[in-house]
């Protein structure tokens, strides 16, 4: 019996303490509201924080503190307290609707329409008939579409600039190759490559891919038809032939002179 009486006494004291805390939290909330309506948002912030120190789960204290921070342009801090309401199991749909609405409004102010649309959409799920929420949601959707169009245009412009840049680079590389001697005209001026292969040609230019010994004369095609040139003789053989021709010419000349001498002798003899 005594234990039961003690348990009831402890429970009543606990309820009284909780009630006293809630009462003090409410008092600070009311005082904070007075400062808020007077435009003293910093003072209202201080009162709401004291209320939260008495009751950290207070929906009103969190909501009003979020509003006081929003008025001071401290948007990220205000979202922290709105978010506490969204995740508070004791919060009603009406409370959550207002919290989602205000979160969406903070993202609109930060020009973040994507997150604004997401939170305002959640607010509309809880209360689809709120005109202010529907207006802000439509505004956020419009801003998001405009932002996406600008992004697409920017990507298209960048792709076009990259395409033109690559085209100019390709043209420049081609010009550099021509200047460095990689074009066909320069190859015609140098018919023999490093491996000694004779380069082909037309209209009197050299033709054929046969190997040409180093130091050997390169002959031109006949009649401009680009036909294969005959294989030239080496220098020693040419000199030997020339020497043989000279000797043959000397022998022939001696014979002619000898014949003329004999003819003259015959003609000068008298018939006595």
Image (tube, grey):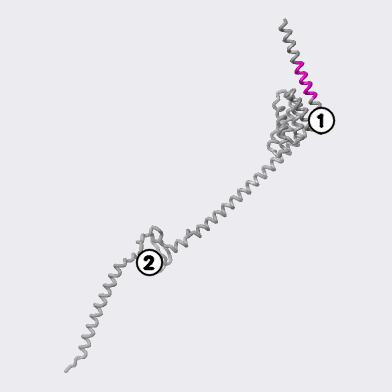
Q: Quadrant of the N terminus?
A: top right
Q: Which residue is mark 1?
A: 35
Tell me: 58 left or right of 168: right
x%, y% of residue 207? 40, 63
SS class, disc 2: loop
In the image shown, does 101 or 133 lie closer to the viewer?
A: 101
Q: Quadrant of residue 234?
A: bottom left
Magenta segment boundaries in residue numbering: 15-27
Q: Quadrant of residue 213?
A: bottom left
Q: Is residue 153 above or below residue 17?
A: below
In the image shown, does 16 or 148 lie closer to the viewer?
A: 16
x%, y% of residue 63? 75, 29
Q: Quick check: is 42 in the magenta stretch?
A: no
Q: Kindly indicate whether the residue at mark 2 contacts the one at mark 1 (C-beta within 8 angstroms).
A: no
Alpha carbon distance from label 1 to label 2: 108 Å
Is residue 269 visible from the viewing direction of this image? yes
Badge 2 crowding class, 10 Å Cα cut-off, few under 14, some 14 to 19, many 20 or more, is some
x%, y% of residue 5? 74, 7
Name the chief secondary structure element in magenta.
helix
Please tell me which residue is depicted at 50% across the width and 57% down the height of the picture.
Answer: 177
Tell me: 45 left or right of 216: right
Mark with earlier residue (1, 2):
1
Q: Which mark's residue is nearer the viewer, 1 or 2?
A: 1
SS class, disc 1: helix
Tell me: 150 left or right of 269: right
In the image shown, does 131 or 103 lie closer to the viewer?
A: 103
Q: Which residue is mark 2?
A: 219
Please tell me which residue is depicted at 33% across the width and 66% down the height of the picture.
Answer: 232
Tell me: 208 left or right of 265: right
């Amino acid at each position: 019996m005594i234990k039961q009486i003690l348990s009831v006494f402890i429970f009543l004291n606990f309820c009284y303490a909780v009630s006293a805390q809630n009462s003090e939290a409410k008092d600070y909330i009311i005082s904070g509201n007075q400062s808020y309506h007077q435009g003293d948002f910093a003072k209202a912030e201080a009162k709401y924080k004291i209320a939260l120190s008495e009751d950290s789960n207070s929906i009103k204290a969190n909501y009003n503190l979020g509003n006081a921070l929003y008025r001071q342009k401290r948007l990220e801090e205000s979202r922290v307290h709105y978010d506490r309401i969204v995740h508070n199991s004791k919060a009603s749909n009406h409370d959550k609707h207002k919290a989602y609405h205000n979160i969406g409004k903070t993202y609109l102010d930060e020009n973040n329409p994507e997150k604004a649309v997401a939170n305002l959409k959640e607010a509309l799920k809880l209360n689809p008939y709120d005109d202010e929420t529907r207006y802000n949601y439509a505004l956020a959707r419009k801003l998001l579409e405009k932002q996406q169009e600008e992004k697409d245009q920017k990507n298209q412009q960048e792709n076009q600039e990259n395409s033109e840049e690559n085209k100019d680079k390709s043209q420049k590389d081609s010009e550099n190759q021509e200047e460095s001697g990689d074009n066909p005209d320069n190859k015609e001026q140098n018919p023999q490559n490093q491996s000694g292969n004779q380069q082909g040609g037309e209209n009197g230019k050299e033709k054929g891919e046969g190997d040409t010994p180093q130091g050997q004369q390169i002959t031109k095609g006949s009649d401009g038809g680009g036909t294969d040139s005959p294989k030239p003789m080496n220098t020693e053989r040419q000199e030997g032939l020339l020497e043989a021709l000279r000797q043959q010419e000397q022998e022939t000349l001696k014979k002619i002179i000898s014949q003329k001498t004999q003819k003259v002798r015959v003609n000068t003899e008298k018939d006595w």
